[in-house]
Amino acid sequence: MSTPAEGSFVAYIGDEYTPERLTVGDRGRVVVAGTSASHVVWQDGERRGQITLTINADLLPAGHPAPIRVSAAAVRDVFDQEGERAVFVMLRDHLAAFAPWVEEAVSSVATRLSTDEHVAQSLAGLTENERADCLSHVAASLFVNVLAGGEL
């Protein structure tokens, strides 16, 4: 397999007699993709909920499996090795349930931005749909920037 996408689902097709104790057909999600090997959190098999660094040639794209519970130790390892972005990828299935609250928060900020005199004047040359799209994008970007500790 070429380099898999982060967050994609894969099945193991490599040698069954490895120190990683993986079995052909074990399914998992790519947490961090590398050019020759990727960190995979396994959904089933003996390594369920654990992460291994697996050679990409031993991985095959697979369908979307059911969400899995990831162990705290696996999260600690991934955070220490790859950082918060990789933890987000590990928890993506579970976090999808929070999307409506995120959308609500972004919408609320976009509405407040639209009532700001300077912002309203700045966007006056846009159509209503363009303004709405722009305000949503600005609001979402503002969230990301503020939470990442960035400068405005």
Image: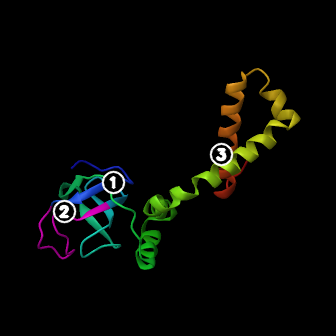
Could one spot residue 149 in this view of the protein? Answer: no
As helix, strand or loop, the secondary structure at mark 3 comes to helix
Vertical placement of residue 13 versus 137, above or below? below
Separation (CA) of disc 3 from disc 1: 27 Å
- The one of 151 and 16 positioned closer to us in this rendering: 16
- Residue highlighted by disc 1: 64
Which residue corresponds to mark 3?
A: 140
Magenta-colored span: 14-28
Q: Nearer the viewer, mark 3 or mark 2?
A: 2
The numbered mark at residue 19 is none
Which residue is depicted at the point 49% across and 59% down? 85
Q: Position of residue 100 (x, y in %)?
A: 61, 52
Main SS category, magenta section: loop
The Cα atoms of the two marked residues, 3 and 2, are separated by: 39 Å
Q: Is 87 positioned to the left or the right of 59 in the image?
A: right
* Residue occupying the point 82% across, 31% down: 120
Q: What residue sits right under mark 2 in the picture?
A: 25
Residue 85 drawn in magenta:
no
With 146 as the anchor, is 68 left or right in this view?
A: left
